[in-house]
Amino acid sequence: MDGTTDEVAQAIAGELRLMDPRVRASRELAAQLLDPEFVEVGGSGRRWTYATMLAELPDHPGSSADGPRFEPSGISGVRLAPGLVHLTFETRLGGLRTRHSSIWRKRAGAGGWRMYHHQATRVSPGGE
């Protein structure tokens, strides 16, 4: 695998870990995958920061081992620069379909790849 492909694969692995209910339910595990400067614009339009996401993620849908799980599809990525990857994909969670865009970065001494930015957009039923 070349460096570009390897970086994209590592970002995808992190993204998939963040969909794991065990990771979502653990502030400690989620903190290892979110950049301290993390920002998300959720499907509702709400803005999330590192602190608010870690505080509330265990209570979000997809965070319970016995609840609905994220079903990702079409995940792909592109290396924007060394240590910076942009991913796009869709998920289904129960009856909700969402499109996602995330930026992952790797900084020296920061413990590996972390999600820096995330945008989610709900897809209306029957939407393309």
Image: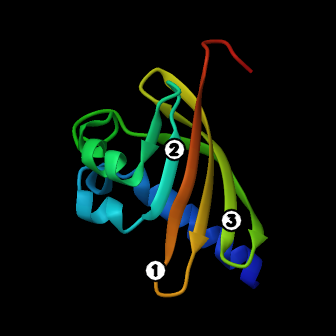
x, y percentage for residue 86? Answer: 69, 58
Residue carrying label 1: 110
Q: Quadrant of residue 85?
A: bottom right
Q: Amino acid at mark 1?
A: Ala
**Residue shown at 61%/15% (left/top)?**
124
**Is 1 displayed left or right of 15 in the figure?**
right
Please determine whether, in this image, residue 128 is positioned above or below residue 38: above
Count all numbered tags in the image, as a single digit: 3
**Residue shown at 46%/80% (left/top)?**
110
Task: Give the quarter of the figure containing the C terminus.
Answer: top right
Residue placed most toward the observer, 102 or 93 = 102
**Is 35 displayed left or right of 57 in the figure?**
right
Please determine whether, in this image, residue 23 is positioned above or below residue 8: above
Residues marked 3 and 1 touching at CB (< 8 Å)? no
Residue placed most toward the observer, 37 or 22 = 37
Please determine whether, in this image, residue 61 is positioned above or below residue 86: above
Q: How is the image coloured?
A: rainbow
Residue carrying label 2: 40
Q: Earlier in the sequence, mark 3 or mark 1?
A: 3
Q: Dot 2: what SS?
A: strand
Q: Dot 3: what SS?
A: strand
Q: Residues within 10 Å of mark 2 (few under 14, many from 20)?
A: many
x, y percentage for residue 32? Answer: 36, 69
Q: Amino acid at mark 2?
A: Glu
